Amino acid sequence: MIKIEEQDLIDWLEHVRIYANNGKVADYIPALANQQPETNAVAYYPIGGEVIFAGQSQYDFTIQSISKVFALAVALIQHGEQAVFSRVDKEPTSDPFYSVAKLEVEKPAKPFNPMINAGALAVTNMIRGRNSEEMVEEILNLVRKLSNDETITYNQEVAQSEYETAFLNRALCYFMKQHGVITGSIEELLDVYTKQCAINMNVKQLARVAAVFANDGRDPDTDEQILPDHVARICKTFMVTCGMYDESGTFAINVGIPAKSGVSGCIMGSIKQSGGIAVFGPALNKKGNSVVGLRFLEKLADVKRWSIF
């Protein structure tokens, strides 16, 4: 068990705050452009212990691409591995998360993995529901269960902002529909996808979710199995190989834990049989990852020797 004290979080977050000056808040989603780069927070949820935190831990942010992990978990639970991986592959890619390039050269036009936008859209397309509201509710229900918080929902303003500017994601969807990778209404799919990306959480809630994955799908407080262990394993594997966009290899060397980031500035990480960690800092590097979050996790991983490698 890796021991982390509250003072560790306070000291290390203070140490890395300055790196926010090296990044830029995402502005291609208009509603995210209003975030303040000096807003920073971290929380650690140990298995069988009390959550500790530092910074603006009550600040709510949209989880963006971290939602891809939850949508994947829902699809795997509902349909099984064979069905899911008939639509999306399991390999990392060096291309940016929004790229269409590999879809054009692969036969069939199957996305490389569920953590890039094309793959995430294909996975979300599989979620059961008679309409977009029911599909969104399936994802929210899982997040609420993992976080033990029934109040979690999505930010309507951010969801609408993403929906109105989702031109590239629409292009990805139409390309994949042409090749039979996705089916049904593109607009309904984008409605679900933008709402899942706009799920609102704070670092304490997100750290608890990460702790469930760290505990192989079991509740960190009660040890109840709330996510099938094989689903937790698959999700964590994708987090290692693809979770930090096309910076995943560097992150694996520098930090070495399963992690997923979102362009709002959040990072969720799972330390096996120890706990879950969540960091927030909206200033991003060129790869789309939080500069403060990366520096914080690199510092903590170096001191605590928590790399799975």
Image (spheres, grey):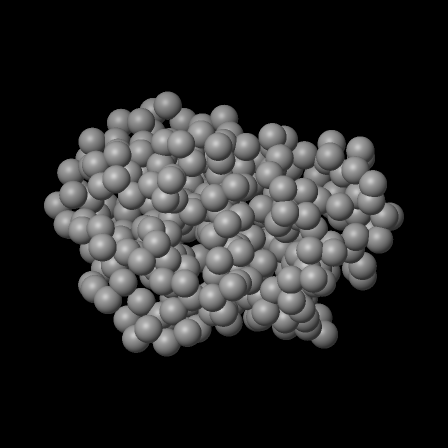
Q: Is residue 176 left or right of residue 52?
A: right
| Residue 43 visible from this viewpoint | yes
Q: Is residue 147 above or below residue 294?
A: below
Q: What is the quadrant of residue 76 in the picture?
A: bottom right
**Residue 218 x/y as whole percent:** 38, 69
Q: What is the quadrant of residue 123 in the picture?
A: bottom right
- Of the 4 image quadrants, the one containing the C terminus is top left
Q: Is residue 201 left or right of residue 85?
A: left
**Residue 103 x/y as whole percent:** 76, 38
Q: Residue at x 21, y 36 (%)?
A: 303
Nearer to us in this view, 137 or 182: 182
Q: What is the quadrant of residue 209 in the picture?
A: bottom left
- Of the 4 image quadrants, the one containing the N terminus is bottom left
In the image as oriented, which residue stretches furthest toward the right?
A: 178
Q: Residue at x 49, y 58 (%)?
A: 233
Q: Is residue 98 above or below residue 199?
A: above
**Residue 235 x/y as whole percent:** 51, 55
**Residue 89 x/y as whole percent:** 68, 48
Q: Residue at x 44, y 73 (%)?
A: 226
In the image as oriented, which residue stretches furthest toward the top?
A: 22
Q: Is residue 200 above or below residue 92?
A: below
In the image as oriented, which residue stretches furthest toward the left?
A: 7
Q: Is residue 45 above or below residue 20?
A: below
Q: Residue at x 65, y 67 (%)?
A: 80
Q: Is residue 187 left or right of residue 29?
A: right
Q: Is residue 7 left or right of residue 212?
A: left
Nearer to us in this view, 268 or 129: 268
Tally of numbered tags: 0
